[in-house]
Image (tube, rainbow, N blue to C red):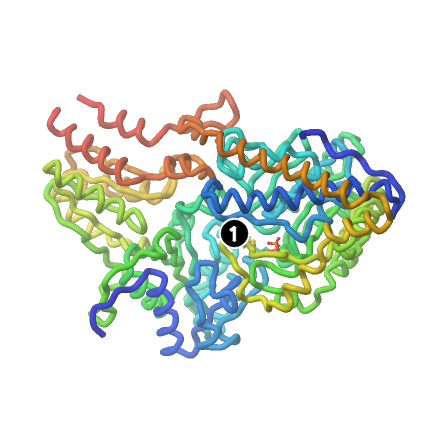
């Protein structure tokens, strides 16, 4: 369950790649569906859960071009990316449930999940907040000559943040191995991309800073993987790049949002751009896998993800005593609890 | 208008609508304030009423939202900039602290920046470390800024209406857990003055000074204290700048005991400022140290147990007051 994602090096469009990409996308979709279920069952920590359904090709495709040792940050809609980099879905789900067994011991949650072992420098609840860290990680990779790249995953909404442009400029100026991945699901909460910018051709901005930049249609995960591979090869050589994946956010912004601001016709068209269904159809059509084999695969994935819920429900919340841990490094003085302080002050005479 | 039931959210919305009707120069700008109606639905349908030129949806660009409000205010508008979460205030701190707050002073009094920055903070939604903070101390620590933090439905209305008439930048921090608070209000009744604290309860034994959501927790604790024979005066500051210290002093001098309660972290926070000031100014009247009940000096966790455990609640306030009062008997 916890094995890192294999490095895909097959040629573009090669049939041997697609089953793996499909499997990963199916895992992401099913995981996200289970996150929704966790919320409905009242077992999630809050409702600020952002599902990446409809965007699976971005995570599966780009991450296929990454390898062990690479580092990355994600935005708040980052479950799929983390899974595609090898995360254990049970520990992810437990974190989303605010449980001690989660990746961050219930302190971070869905929007602040991280795992240094897998190179995940952190999801972020500040739009654009995780982007500059990959510049720093790029500096470190160059300094330590690791050959690693660092990738920032963010949404179209983050293109409104100045820090993206500051970061891209530095990466280009210093020829850092940085990849900027913009998952354009057409919306930042209720604001459609054309309501947030006069020029929605987002990759042009990166070109202005001297980055290699392209836009790829997220419907086709093989196309995403191919673009990812092409750009990542350059990035490893110190040519930073920017990749836009065009897709559609199938459901609401977070769990409580029903997207009343979207036209039902638009939603229907948007959801027809389904990368999972598209890959499945391609596998059948090219006779790579039969429908029954895909059904079996889907059922395996469903069982894997069902287990994450059972696991999470059985876990406990972190003990109150853990509250003061990790504000500072182990061994450093911990903050004094308010209660203790009051007792100390009043225990006179 | 007679007495009617209203939520904190609706009172804020009404304050915006009434101000916009009264003053055509009032505009709103922020993320999701228009078509979406606001992340917490405070600006719901205002775009229908006042149009997209006065209710402006912005890109996700906090520094420029606040900066644009500064310029608009200098150029004759009365902007209300909305910051979706107070946690993003750090991103805007240059525009707020170096520009908005200092322009009147640096430019020798030529011009002010009459803008309102509406935002919300606090715990209560398992929203995690970057969406749950109480950062009012950043604002209170910055000369030139005014700061209002309503606890009640009536104050949500009146303070926002008044903020929109003030000559200087006002940061207006709502509490996310109060939006659904319902109270009976008569908004036509005379409003309390801006900058004046409210006495929510009077008692002979101690004064509890607080603001925002903690007012409700303190009132709950005060009820339990009364059952134990301890009577507390509860002061709701309403605005932290200006700060109505006269009211605090008057009541502390009467009881000789003071406690301050704030959801923000304890160290170098609003509670620290209030406690220091009470200790200095009421020294001769105090029989016990001023006690701070405040947020733990830690980030907020997504786990509900840790989240609620890291900020004051009625129980901690009650217990702390009991300890403060029983320390008197020991002397
Ligand atoms: C600095 C900051 N501003 C605003 C928000 C509130 N917010 C959270 S997600 C979001 C929309 C982000 O859109 P996008 O970057 O396209 O990501 P998506 O949600 O579409 O995946 C907004 C405005 C935030 N979390 N951080
Ligand atoms: Mg988006």
Residue at image coords 45%, 71%: B45
Q: Residue at x 63, y 44 (%)?
A: A30
On the image, which quarter does residue B9 sit in? Answer: bottom left
The x and y percentages for residue B227 are 12, 39
Q: Residue at x 38, y 58 (%)?
A: B172
- Chain letter of the residue carrying label 1: A
Q: How many marks?
A: 1
Crowdedness of circle 1 by 10 Å Cα count: few (<14), some, many (20+)?
Answer: some
Nearer to us in this view, A274 or B285 = A274
The answer to whether residue A316 is seen in the rendering is: yes
Q: Is mark 1 within 8 Å of ligand 1?
A: no
Quadrant placement of the N terminus of chain A: top right
Which residue is identified by label 1? Answer: A255
Q: Is A171 positioned to the left or the right of B45 in the image?
A: right
Furthest residue to the front?
Answer: A292
Whole-percent x, y for residue B215 in the image: 26, 49
Q: Is residue A185 above or below residue B161?
A: above
Q: Is residue A178 visible?
A: no
Describe residue B257's horizontal placement relative to residue A252 as left or right. Answer: left
Q: Is residue A275 left or right of residue B223?
A: right
């Amino acid at each position: 369950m916890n094995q890192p994602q294999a490095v895909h090096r097959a040629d573009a469009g090669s049939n041997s790649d697609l089953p793996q990409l499909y499997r990963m996308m199916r895992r992401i979709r099913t995981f996200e569906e289970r996150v929704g279920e966790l919320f409905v069952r009242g077992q999630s920590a809050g409702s600020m859960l952002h599902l990446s359904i409809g965007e699976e090709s971005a995570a599966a495709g780009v991450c296929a071009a990454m390898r062990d040792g690479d580092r990355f940050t994600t935005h708040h809609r980052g479950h799929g990316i983390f899974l595609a980099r090898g995360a254990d879905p049970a520990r992810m789900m437990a974190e989303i449930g605010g449980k001690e067994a989660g990746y961050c011991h219930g302190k971070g949650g869905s929007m602040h999940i991280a795992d240094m072992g897998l190179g995940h420098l952190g999801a972020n609840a500040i739009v654009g907040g995780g982007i500059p860290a990959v510049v720093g990680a790029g500096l470190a990779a160059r300094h330590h000559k690791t050959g690693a790249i660092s990738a920032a995953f963010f949404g179209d909404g983050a293109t409104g943040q100045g820090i993206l442009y500051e970061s891209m400029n530095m990466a280009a100026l210093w020829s850092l191995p940085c990849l900027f991945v913009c998952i354009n699901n057409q919306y930042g909460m209720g604001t459609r991309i054309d309501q947030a910018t006069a020029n929605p051709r987002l990759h042009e901005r990166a070109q202005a800073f001297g980055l290699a930049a392209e836009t790829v249609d997220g419907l086709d995960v093989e196309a995403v993987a191919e673009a990812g591979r092409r750009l990542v090869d350059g990035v490893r050589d110190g040519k930073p790049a920017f990749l836009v994946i065009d897709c559609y956010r199938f459901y609401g912004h977070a769990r409580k949002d029903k997207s009343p601001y979207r036209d039902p016709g638009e939603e229907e068209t948007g959801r027809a751009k389904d990368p999972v269904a598209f890959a499945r159809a391609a596998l059948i059509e090219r006779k790579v896998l039969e429908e029954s084999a895909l059904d079996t695969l889907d059922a395996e994935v469903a069982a894997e993800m069902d287990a994450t819920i059972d696991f999470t429900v059985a876990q406990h919340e972190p003990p109150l005593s853990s509250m003061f841990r990790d504000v500072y490094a182990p061994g450093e003085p911990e903050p004094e609890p308010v209660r203790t302080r009051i007792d100390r002050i009043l225990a006179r005479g | 208008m007679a007495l009617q039931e209203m939520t904190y959210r609706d009172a804020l919305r009404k304050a915006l609508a009434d101000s916009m009707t009264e003053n055509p120069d009032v505009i709103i700008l922020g993320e999701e304030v228009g078509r979406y109606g606001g992340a917490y639905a405070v600006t719901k349908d205002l775009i229908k009423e006042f149009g997209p030129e006065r209710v402006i949806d912005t890109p996700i660009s906090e520094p420029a939202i606040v900066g644009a409000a500064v310029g608009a205010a200098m150029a004759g508008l009365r902007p209300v900039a909305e910051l979706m979460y107070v946690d993003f205030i750090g991103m805007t701190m240059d525009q707020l602290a170096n520009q908005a707050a200092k322009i009147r002073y640096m430019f020798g009094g030529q011009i002010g920046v009459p803008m309102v920055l509406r935002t919300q903070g606090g715990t209560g939604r398992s929203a995690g470390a970057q969406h749950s903070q109480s950062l009012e101390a950043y604002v209170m620590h910055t000369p030139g800024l005014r700061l209002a933090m309503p606890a009640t439905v009536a104050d949500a209305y009146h303070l926002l209406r008044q903020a929109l008439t003030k000559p200087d930048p006002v940061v207006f921090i709502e509490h996310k857990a109060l939006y659904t608070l319902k109270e009976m209000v008569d908004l036509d009744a005379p409003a309390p003055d801006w900058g004046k604290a409210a006495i929510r309860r009077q008692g002979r034994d101690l004064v509890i000074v607080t603001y925002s959501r903690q007012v409700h927790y303190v009132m709950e604790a005060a009820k339990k204290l009364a059952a134990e024979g301890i009577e507390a005066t509860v002061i709701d500051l309403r605005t932290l700048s200006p700060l109505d210290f006269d009211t605090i002093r008057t009541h502390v001098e009467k009881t000789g005991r003071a406690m301050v309660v704030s959801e923000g972290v304890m160290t170098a926070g609003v509670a620290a400022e209030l406690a220091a000031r009470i200790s200095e100014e009421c020294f001769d009247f105090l029989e016990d140290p001023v006690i701070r009940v405040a947020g733990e000096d830690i980030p907020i966790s997504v786990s509900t147990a840790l989240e609620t455990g890291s900020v004051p609640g009625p129980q901690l306030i009650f217990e702390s007051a009991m300890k403060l009062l029983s320390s008197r008997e020991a002397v």
